[in-house]
Amino acid sequence: MTQEEALKILKTGENVFITGPAGSGKTHVINQYIAYLRESGVEPEITASTGIAATHIGGTTIHSWSGLGIRDFLSERELEELEERAMLFKRMQKATVLIIDEVSMLHHFRLDMVERVARFLRRREKAFGGLQVILCGDFFQLPPVSRGSEEEPLFIYHSEAWKKMGLKICYLEEQHRQNDKAYLGVLNAIRDNRVKHPEMALLFSRMGKGAGEGVLTRLYPHNADVDRENERELAKLPTKAYSYKMTGKGNDRAVEALKKGCLAPEVLTLKKDARVMFVKNNFEEGYANGTLGTVVECDQYGVKVKTLSGREIKVVPTSWIIEDNGRKVAEINQYPLRLAWAITIHKSQGMSMDAAEIDLSKSFEVGMGYVALSRVRSLAGLTLKGINEGALRMNEEVLQYDDYFRKISAEHAKEIRLLDEETYKQRSNEFLARSGAKSKKTKAEKGEASNTLSLTKELLLQGKNIKEIAKERELTKETIINHLFKLRSLSPDLDLSAIKEELSEKKILTIKDIVQSAGEGNGNGLTLSELKRIIGDRYSYDEIKIAQLFF
């Protein structure tokens, strides 16, 4: 199935499972759908199975969104207590679309718990209380992990919720990460469990081979190897070491859960020139979760980091909090940093790398080799340090389900191709109407668009700013900004000097720096929704749009 076909199915309001190989564009389709919904006036609920995955998609964890938190079981009493949480109840009543990303790591019984909460709080007996639910992920990626006394974790296709949803399967076949056909053939062979001598020969050809100066990160299966690598590199630096200890308060169990889920270490040891990665978003200060940098100063008074974009940031300790019904249950505080010469394969999931050094000699989980190797865009970018017999094994059960998903997806792709345009538009418009979308413009209204743009341009060239144009035209400021955005796309050389006072140069530069620090260059080619997800809540859509005019 193509991305376009998957997007059309989503727009009809069906419950959907989006899957496919690493790099097939699953998150891209989700982002396109999010942008479509927002442009139609519908705000989707964006979640993921883990905190790291939630950061990648610009949302929250499904545990937090549903109010379940760290619960492993939901009693009738607890369900009624959730009902008493006004904010949660209001959110559930208002919601229309729920997106859950990286579902391979979500326990089957937790999806059932989320479905039960949604159905109960929304007062509807349909699955998830009638929400459109979009699940996104690849079961060949890393599986759910059990915590001691938990029920045995199974993939979510074993859940009761999965059976109730009547899911359309969208198996994406295109490839957008790997442009190296030979390497893509290796990855596909691993995924299909048919690795033979030619594929192994290609992999072994990269054993110990350097990928050039582009190698920034080493991937290991175990935290111990990552810690050892980072400690060894830190020890090489001749500068003085300073340690910063995490503090915590509140419910002991909740504090421990916070510590386990937090990427910042309990004791952070740094030196000048150490390579570090930010592990939390703070867009006001100019960094995001995953921003890389080098320590330029550290002592008992604080830490200063220079990011790859060249920005120097004075880092201050930050908080991670668990709340329940508006009450703070637990809190930890630490500098939002960790050493970054190496990371684990688990933490690399979702990343795309030009080059990496990968050690699979201690792989212990099926799918781990596939996850690590599929992070790299080409064979030339791979340096293989080691590999064991189990590194390329795939889950036998998943292999069977994957074949089933491919077949069903082909049927659903055929259905959407055969659907006539009139019926498709009717279904998508009816779904938007049910979701509370703003009514779309008529053809007559669209025909007037060129005239209204011309009037705005005329006033702009007279030297009037956004506020003055909006007042004279009796339109909202947001509408005028939209006009300017369209005018700018039509005429890149348009004189915008009259609106420079609308947003300070400092804010424009800050927004630009945030986008650069997230690895997206100057933001060209990104939609407004994609920019907003990178920048966060610090700046409004209007401010981002104005700033983008000057990128």
Image (spheres, helix red, strand yellow):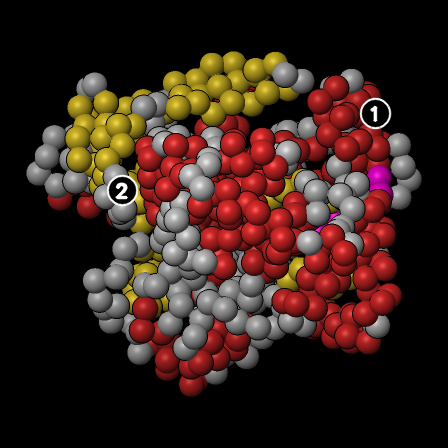
**Within 10 angstroms of label 1, few (less than 14), some, or many (20 or more) residues?**
few
At label 2, the amino acid type is Thr
Residue pictured at 78% horizontal, 46% vertical: 439
User: Which numbered disc flags the more N-terminal residue, 1 or 2?
Assistant: 1
Residue pictured at 76% horizontal, 44% vertical: 437
Q: How many marks?
A: 2
**Magenta-colored span:** 127-134
Q: Is residue 59 left or right of residue 282?
A: right
Determine if residue 14 is in view. no
Find numbered disc 1 in the image and state the secondary structure of the residue it sits on. helix
Residue that carries the numbered disc 1 in the rendered image: 76
Q: Quadrant of residue 296?
A: top left
Mark in the foreground, 1 or 2: 2
**Within 10 angstroms of label 2, few (less than 14), some, or many (20 or more) residues?**
many
Q: Position of residue 297 (x, y in %)?
A: 17, 30
Q: Position of residue 404 (x, y in %)?
A: 74, 70
Which residue reaches farthest right? 125
Q: Position of residue 299 (x, y in %)?
A: 17, 24
Residue pictured at 50% horizontal, 36% vertical: 466
Mark number for residue 307?
2
* Up-down relation of residue 80 to residue 348 (above or below): above
At label 1, the amino acid type is Glu
> Which residue occupies the foreground of this view, 152 or 301?
301
Find numbered disc 2 in the image and state the secondary structure of the residue it sits on. strand
Q: Is residue 421 left or right of residue 545?
A: right
Image quarter (top left, top right, bottom left or bottom right) of the N terminus: bottom right
Residue pictured at 46% horizontal, 67% vertical: 177
Q: Are marks 1 and 2 in contact (CB under 8 Å)?
A: no
